[in-house]
Image: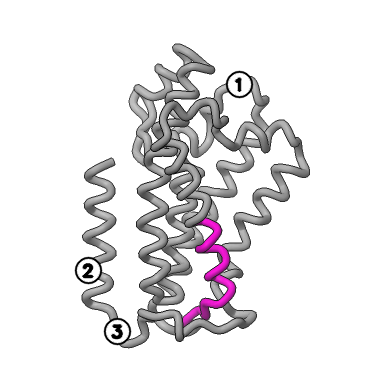
């Protein structure tokens, strides 16, 4: 994870240092409009609606129980992650997309990758019984594909809108999601025992080819 965060931070820093005047640095660039970043971020709302509509028990499984958090720090990180995600969602309503600019196409490409990961992960999530460990589809290449998809979608929004504020929110979010992933893994080990321990040995935490 440290290597992943380092590469991500360096990548985003290079973008920021080499960015054009199109990049937004302050809130004064915000305005409400139809062609704003909320179009991208709305996929999370649709995902929650679909999961809730299919099965409320499945929706309950999509969140780590509070009792799984063993320290005050883990609880605070969970709260911070939710706050940052909500702020990103709210800010997207006021954040115009740079339609026609190269940043928009780059962001749209990253967003589509994240959307595909989110869609396939959600499908496996709702089609697998709640008492079974999900190991098929994109769950074969990432143990936390929902978190991975969230980061990719947020990064896509940041690029498509050339927003430094959204870049910052994305970095904070990915840090929080890393610690959320650690809590989730501990909870899954307690729930699925050796099955999840073996799964952890085969499948990378974030992304990679499964081990035989």
Asked if residue 34 is positioned above or below residue 151 in the image, the reply reads: below
Q: Quadrant of the C terminus?
A: top left
Task: Write down the region rendered in magenta.
Answer: 85-98
Q: Quadrant of the N terminus?
A: top left
Disc 2 or 1, which lies upstream in sequence? 2
Instruction: Determine crowd level at label 3: few under 14, some 14-19, many 20+ residues with C-alpha closer than 10 A.
Output: few
- Which of the 4 quarters of the picture holds residue 180? top left
How far across and how far down the image is residue 36, in percent?
57, 77
How far across and how far down the image is residue 96, in percent?
52, 80
The residue at the point 65 percent across, 29 percent down is 128
Give the alpha-carbon distance from disc 2 to disc 3, as whole Å: 12 Å
Asked if residue 167 is positioned above or below residue 128 in the image, the reply reads: below
Residue 14 image label: 2
Residues marked 2 and 1 touching at CB (< 8 Å): no
Asked if residue 132 is positioned above or below residue 72 in the image, the reply reads: above
How far across and how far down the image is residue 52, in percent?
73, 43
How far across and how far down the image is residue 64, in percent?
54, 33
Report if residue 160 is visible in the image.
yes
- Per the image, the residue denoted by label 3 is 20
Along the line of sight, the residue nearer the viewer: 61 or 200: 61
The residue at the point 49 percent across, 23 percent down is 188
The residue at the point 43 percent across, 54 percent down is 151
The residue at the point 46 percent across, 60 percent down is 154
| Left or right placement of residue 147 versus residue 126 in this view | left
- Per the image, the residue denoted by label 1 is 132
Confirm whether the magenta stretch covers residue 89: yes
């Amino acid at each position: 994870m440290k290597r992943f965060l380092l590469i991500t931070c360096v990548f985003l820093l290079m973008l920021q240092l080499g960015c054009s005047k199109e990049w937004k640095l302050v809130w004064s660039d915000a305005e409400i409009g139809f062609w704003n970043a909320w179009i991208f971020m709305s996929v999370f709302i649709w995902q929650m609606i679909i999961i809730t509509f299919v099965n409320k028990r499945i929706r309950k499984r999509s969140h780590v129980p509070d009792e799984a958090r063993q320290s005050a720090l883990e609880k605070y990180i969970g709260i911070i992650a939710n706050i940052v995600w909500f702020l990103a969602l709210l800010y997207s309503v006021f954040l115009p997309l740079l339609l026609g600019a190269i940043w928009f196409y780059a962001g749209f490409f990253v967003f589509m990758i994240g959307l595909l990961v989110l869609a396939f992960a959600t499908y496996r999530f709702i089609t697998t019984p709640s008492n079974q460990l999900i190991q098929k589809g994109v769950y074969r290449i990432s143990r936390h594909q929902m978190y991975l998809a969230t980061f990719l979608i947020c990064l896509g929004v940041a690029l498509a809108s050339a927003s430094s504020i959204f870049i910052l929110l994305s970095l904070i979010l990915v840090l929080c999601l890393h610690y959320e992933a650690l809590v989730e893994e501990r909870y899954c080990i307690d729930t699925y025992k050796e099955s999840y321990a073996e799964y952890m040995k085969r499948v990378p935490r974030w992304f990679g080819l499964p081990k035989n």
